[in-house]
Amino acid sequence: MRSRHLDGPWNPEEPVEVTPEEYEHQVLAWLRASESNQADLHVKHLKKITGSGGEYEFDVVARFTRFGGAEFVVLVECKRYAQTVKRDLVLTLHAKLADVGAHKGMMFSTGGFQQGAIEYASQHGIALVIFQDGKATYQTRARGPVVKPSPWVDLPRFVGVRMTVEEVEGHKRWRSHTLQDGDVGAIDEFLADT
């Protein structure tokens, strides 16, 4: 039987094997796919932005306009970690957003996120996306050991799982929304919520 990850059942047991270049280029591809769904969205890789605290380099910076010309800036960080991302890193991204005058943030992680990180991000308009091997989407109804997908099953190389939590009538409601090539609705939904 498959064991659960100690920091949350939504996290991968093992981080995906991906080079830094593959990782950032896949995130770029998803955001650029969202460009076709969003009016006036522009995505740049490894962009430097100066704030009152100095200069920061972000893995990706996206800009788009809404409401007849108001510009929105989205800062994106890609964390290639074996362990889960803690709330402190999300707090740091939130502080950078404020320092450079950006409006939204996104963080991708190969190791997943601790519960406190997801809760904080959900309260502060930051999207958290777990970057995984596409095989993570393969499910069976078999009992016992995890069954590997057959070679003929058409699975994407990588997938992302956007995690959110909200309070509903005093209870936490966890949501996950998968994104992959050809389906970037999780990003579109986040960007549309301005």
Image: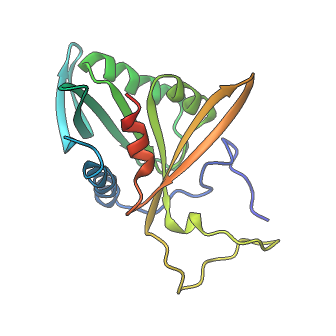
Q: Nearer the viewer, residue 123 or 182?
A: 182
Q: Position of residue 77 (x, y in %)?
A: 35, 39
- Residue 13 falls in image quadrant: bottom right
Residue that sits furthest to the top in the current view: 52
- Residue 126 falls in image quadrant: top left
At horizontal 22% and vertical 35% (from top left) the residue drawn is 63
Q: Nearer the viewer, residue 156 or 71?
A: 71
Residue that sits furthest to the front in the current view: 68
**For residue 14, side relative to residue 186 (left or right):** right
At horizontal 30% and vertical 33% (from top left) the residue drawn is 75
Residue that sits furthest to the right in the current view: 143
Q: Quadrant of the N terminus?
A: bottom right
Colour pattern: rainbow
Q: Position of residue 148 (x, y in %)?
A: 63, 77
* Image: 193 above or below 45: above
**Count the marks: how many?**
0
At horizontal 33% and vertical 58% (from top left) the residue drawn is 26
- Residue 193 falls in image quadrant: top left
Q: Nearer the viewer, residue 85 or 103?
A: 103
Q: Position of residue 191 (x, y in %)?
A: 36, 37
**For residue 58, side relative to residue 171 (left or right):** left
Q: Position of residue 138 (x, y in %)?
A: 61, 69
**For residue 99, side relative to residue 138 (left or right):** left
At horizontal 24% and vertical 38% (from top left) the residue drawn is 61
Q: Quadrant of the C terminus?
A: top left
